[in-house]
Image (cartoon, helix red, strand yellow):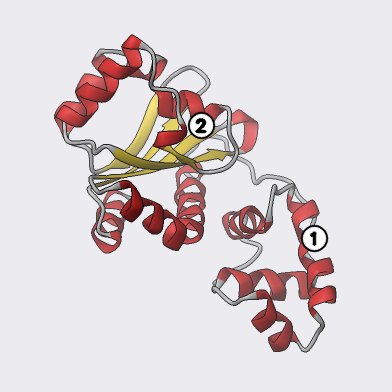
């Protein structure tokens, strides 16, 4: 996983990429490209307790741009300055992940570019990053002792086809054309799959289907 996340960081051309799992007991696991000195400092100073990224993502199900978070407190501003001084980067994008039995993790990218460039990067890559985040979490869960597969309803063959093509990057029009169905019928398949997967939206449904091994792309 460490080798993979380093390769992904280089592929996306960002300063850092991190997968960070926080257990219910406050234990922290993960992999990433932050410097060892910053990782040790983060743990030693118990920054988990005040980190606006962690706190903000605990309250969200959708990806979060760091500029949307509350950095107004004195402790939070000091934390931000310390992070930047240790090379974390002033722009950030974090994807909250919630797994079985209350599991919570984050997949985060950080970089040093202007706001316009970063907004364009997020718009261009957010969908792929959500899928990657769930791939990482699915792999991490394999190492959890006593893990059992998450229960869920099976997808129909047509739902599997639709979700697989969406995961491959097809537009809805392209999926409907490939399956020789109307877009209205396609919407019905997607909505049915979303409800079965307990997903908030189509991208979330695709990520869950992949992480549960229901589709392969």
As drawn, the residue found furthest toward the front would be 116
Label 2 Cα crowd, 10 Å radius (few <14 / some 14-19 / many 20+): many
Image coordinates for residue 18, horizontal then vertical, percent: 33, 42
Residue occupied by mark 1: 191
Q: Is residue 139 above or below residue 171?
A: above
Q: Is residue 184 above or below residue 198?
A: below
For residue 116, which numbered disc appears in the image?
Answer: none
Image coordinates for residue 48, horizontal then vertical, percent: 38, 19
Which is more toward the observer, 207 or 127? 127
The answer to which image quadrant residue 187 occupies is bottom right
Quadrant holding the C terminus: bottom right
Question: From this viewpoint, is residue 43 visible?
Answer: no
The answer to which image quadrant residue 29 occupies is top left
What is the spatial separation of the Cα atoms under label 2 and label 1, in whole angstroms?
A: 26 Å
Q: Is residue 160 left or right of residue 169?
A: right
The answer to which image quadrant residue 78 occupies is top left
Q: Secondary structure at mark 1?
A: helix
Nearest to N terminus: mark 2 or mark 1: 2
Q: Is residue 177 left or right of residue 124?
A: right
Which is more toward the observer, 90 or 23? 90
Label 1 Cα crowd, 10 Å radius (few <14 / some 14-19 / many 20+): some
Q: Are marks 2 and 1 in contact (CB under 8 Å)?
A: no
Q: Tally the numbered discs.
A: 2
Image coordinates for residue 130, horizontal then vertical, percent: 50, 53
Q: Is residue 111 left or right of residue 192?
A: left
Image coordinates for residue 188, horizontal then vertical, percent: 84, 67
Tell me the residue at 70%/76% (across/down).
161
Residue occupied by mark 2: 57
Which is more toward the observer, 69 or 176? 69
Q: Secondary structure at mark 2?
A: helix
Tell me the residue at 82%/60% (across/down).
192
């Amino acid at each position: 996983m460490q080798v993979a996340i380093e390769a992904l960081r280089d592929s996306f051309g960002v300063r850092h990429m991190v997968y960070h799992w926080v257990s219910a007991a406050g234990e922290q696991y993960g992999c990433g490209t932050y410097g060892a000195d910053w990782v040790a400092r983060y743990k030693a100073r118990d920054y988990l307790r005040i980190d606006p990224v962690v706190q903000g993502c605990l309250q969200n199900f959708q990806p979060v741009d760091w500029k949307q978070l509350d950095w107004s407190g004195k402790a939070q501003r000091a934390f931000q300055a310390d992070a930047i001084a240790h090379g974390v980067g002033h722009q950030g994008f974090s994807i909250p992940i919630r797994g079985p039995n209350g599991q919570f993790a984050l997949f985060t990218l950080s970089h040093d570019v202007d706001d316009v460039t970063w907004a364009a990067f997020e718009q261009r890559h957010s969908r792929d990053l959500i899928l990657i985040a769930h791939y990482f979490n699915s792999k991490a869960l394999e190492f959890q002792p006593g893990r059992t597969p998450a229960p869920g309803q099976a997808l129909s063959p047509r739902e599997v086809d639709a979700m697989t093509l969406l995961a491959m990057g097809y537009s809805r029009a392209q999926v409907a054309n490939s399956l020789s169905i109307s877009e209205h019928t396609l919407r019905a398949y997607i909505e049915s799959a979303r409800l079965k997967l307990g997903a908030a939206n189509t991208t979330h449904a695709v990520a869950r289907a992949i992480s549960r091994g229901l589709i392969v792309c």
